[in-house]
Image (tube, helix red, strand yellow):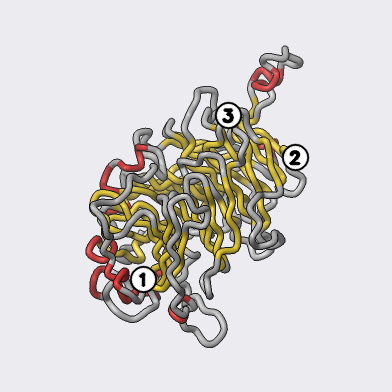
Amino acid sequence: MAGGVCQASKWRRAATVATGNGGASAVGRLPALPSVTCPEDSPAGSAVRTLWSKAAAGVCSGPGLPARAAAAPAAMAQARGVNSLRFNQDQSCFCCAMESGVRIFNVEPLMEKGHLDAEQVGSVVLVEMLHRSNLLAIVGGGGNPKFSDLSVLIWDDAREGKDAKDKLVLEFTFTKPVLAVRMRHDKIVIVLRSRIYVFSFPENPTKLFEFDTRDNPKGLCDLCPSLEKQLLVFPGHKCGSLQLVDLGSAKPGTSSAPFTINAHQSEVACAALGPGGALVASASRKGTLIRLFDTHSRAKVVELRRGTDPATLYCLAFSPDAAFLCASSDKGTVHVFALRDTRLNRRSALARVGKVGPVLGPYVESQWSLASFTVPAEAACVCAFGRGGRSPCSVVAVCVDGTFHKYVFTPDGNCNREAFDVYLDICDDDDF
């Protein structure tokens, strides 16, 4: 396909996202929605419309784009023009928002499945996949933007045509920069610095919920993709707290989360929901401890120790069966913890000594990772578990310096590198 876009069938599983009749794209069939203009201080400062109009040309009006809060640590803006990285919902693909556009990679085997070049979308700061479907959510920004960071654009790769105006089918516009986007098969969540919006999606998108949050400069938020549980987690109003909302049972139009978990004493820096929504993991800005909570009872299930020195956590990720958790940080180490059988996790040697004082007690009782491996410390990375369904298990780490790392680990803590590559040097469908 011309313009640098791969055939949609290359990175879609089988069919386009469809509702109702036939296999046509649901987004492609949306009627034109009226544009809504809201004042800057309006809590409802958002609009959704189809992109058949002049806006589809991708030209931003005004003298320049507003400054955008960082969606990731400063290291994410480094080497080779990668602005952010995201795995899709089942961790089988990852997408790169880049100064040169968007690139999409399959994980196992590692190969490029598609890309959008700068001529089509300009520089991009955020991109989110909807499983392996034809739909992408894109937020512009960076050094050479074609689209504003005030908007989320929906790209439908199943639509015919070569130009952006043919592929961009929806635009969600706000009065403040967009810091994160999360999608599931029936909803899209858009995160601003102090507010979160939830829309029905992709058929006839309408605003369902609006939540105020504590100042959230990193756009922290996670959305459970499970069909059974529609959980959303984001920072609460109190320092160190998390808010949990079950979007399936909450009444549309409500503005406050019904459940709060007091997870940490300092600000929350990272949070992730388990694949089935039963667990939520979080870490504070200190980055030494990771705590897991039951989302139903809100009780703490286990406390895991990443290390003793403060660190900035980049990523928390559950294995598909929620038996393990991995974490990456600016220390350049990816840690793997056991959740189903916590006896596999390492303990401090002092734990064998017996009873200790109240100062050392929490440290001695901590559970340390059962396995770990290193990646370049200067390059931020996201991590995920392999989906081969075989033993030993595998973890992949994708770094902003363009490197791809795959390690296998065993329950007894052995961890060995299985693969290394530079994903940015891989061409379309170049086998791993």
Identify the image quadrant of residue 289.
top right
Going by the image, does 415 lie left or right of 100?
right
Residue type, numbered disc 2: Ala
**Callout 2: helix, strand or loop?**
loop
Task: Judge by depth and name the residue closer to the eye, 100 or 187.
Answer: 187
CB atoms at circles 3 and 1 under 8 Å apart?
Answer: no
Identify the image quadrant of residue 343.
top right
Residue type, numbered disc 1: Leu
Q: Earlier in the sequence, mark 2 or mark 1?
A: 1
Q: How far apart are marks 3 and 1 (CA)?
A: 41 Å
Check the image and name the residue furthest to the top. Answer: 357
Q: Position of residue 209 (x, y in %)?
A: 60, 59
Q: Position of residue 169 (x, y in %)?
A: 39, 73
Check the image and name the residue furthest to the bottom. Answer: 22
**Callout 1: helix, strand or loop?**
strand
Residue matched to label 1: 168
Q: Which of marks 2 and 3 is nearer the N terminus?
A: 3
Residue type, numbered disc 3: Ser
